[in-house]
DNA sequence: GTGATATATGAACATATGTTCATATATCAC
DNA sequence: GTGATATATGAACATATGTTCATATATCAC
């Protein structure tokens, strides 16, 4: 991980630095998680995991502005988490990939685990 | 998912609405992912997945301000992703849980998958 | 006790991000 | 062709978020 130049890293830390994945990968990773890190987008993904839906339906489900939904779908599409198929004037969105569901479920497992074992919040 | 009141959701969408997890869970889920959605925090988690480290060492590794690191460690601690053990004047941080590693790895798999199958960016 | 070191934290600030509003584009029914 | 409908998108705006700076607190060596 070449964030600090090697010669600036104390010797004891060199091996830690060397075991870290390349920086570029870490940027992509945080970019990916950032997309999941918004309530509206999570709700959209969740809805799409149940069924493919057009923009208007998603907006109705979440009781949100069509424009807001379109903007967020754009973000999700750029992250390759959803795909579109145009049908007439509608745009039908769906999950792009089963990876999405896996990441999702993994998160769920953590949240649930967290709710049980220990107290709430803080 | 009681975001839109049931009587405002068109009948065809009712079953989708009913299959969605409760809202509160979705908030917790996006909160969790949001914490992973920052480069600094990802780097910290990544470093701690190699070895437990004190604040100063993390700051040296990432070539960042000690204060910035402390602030982010606070966020990570609140999300229960890291734990602290004080030793003298140092605070030794480590991953709280193997779940962290799992979520992490899942993300990696997606990123890698993405890099291969298809073109870069956009 | 003193001075040095490690960490935590509040305030200020700059930047990023999400939503709304207005509007453009495209497709439909007629 | 017209008017209606579905979606996308830029600009403006408000809010959230991350970093820095200054400083408080705690522990160490002496």
Image (cartoon, coloured by chain):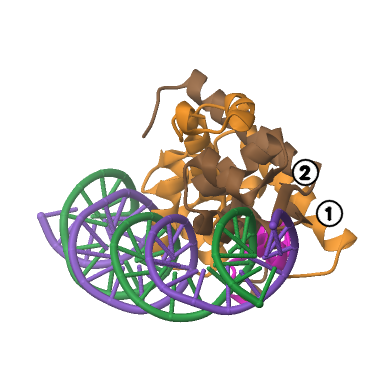
Chain colours: A brown, B orange, C purple, D green
Q: Front-most of B54 and B21?
A: B21
Q: Position of residue B48 (x, y in %)?
A: 59, 48
Q: CA distance from mark 1 to mark 2?
A: 9 Å
Element at label 1 = helix
Q: Quadrant of the C terminus of chain A?
A: top left
Q: Is residue A58 left or right of residue A99?
A: left
* Location of residue A115 with respect to A27 vertically, above or below: above
Q: Position of residue B36 (x, y in %)?
A: 56, 50
Mark seen at residue A99:
2
Q: Which chain does the residue under circle 2 lie in?
A: A
Q: Front-most of B35 and B49?
A: B35
The segment highlighted magenta reads A7-29
Q: Is residue A6 magenta?
A: no
Q: Position of residue B12 (x, y in %)?
A: 64, 31
Q: Which chain does the residue under circle 1 lie in?
A: B
Mark seen at residue A20:
none
User: Does any portion of residue A12 appear in the rendered image?
Assistant: no
Residue closest to the far right: B117
Element at label 2 = helix
In the image, are marks 1 and 2 on the same chain?
Answer: no
Q: Front-most of A5 and B38?
A: B38
* Location of residue A12 with respect to B52 vertically, above or below: below
Q: Position of residue B32 (x, y in %)?
A: 52, 41
Q: Are marks 1 and 2 in contact (CB under 8 Å)?
A: yes
Q: Residues within 10 Å of mark 2 (few under 14, many from 20)?
A: some
Residue of label 1: B113
* Location of residue D14 with respect to D22 vertically, above or below: above
Residue closest to the far top: A116
Residue drawn at x 50%, y 45% as measured from the top left: A39
Q: Residues within 10 Å of mark 1 (few under 14, many from 20)?
A: few
Residue drawn at x 55%, y 30% as measured from the top left: A111
Q: Is residue A27 left or right of residue D27?
A: right
């Amino acid at each position: 991980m070449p964030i600090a130049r090697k010669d600036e890293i104390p010797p004891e830390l060199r091996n830690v630095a060397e075991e870290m994945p390349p920086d570029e990968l870490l940027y992509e990773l945080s970019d990916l998680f950032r997309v999941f890190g918004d309530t509206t987008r999570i709700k959209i993904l969740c809805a799409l995991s149940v069924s493919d839906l057009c923009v208007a339906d998603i907006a109705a489900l979440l009781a949100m502005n069509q424009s807001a939904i379109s903007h967020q779908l754009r973000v999700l599409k750029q992250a390759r988490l959803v795909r579109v198929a145009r049908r007439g004037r509608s745009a039908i969105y769906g999950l792009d990939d089963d990876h999405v569901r896996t990441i999702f479920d993994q998160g769920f497992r953590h949240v649930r685990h967290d709710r049980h074992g220990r107290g709430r919040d803080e």
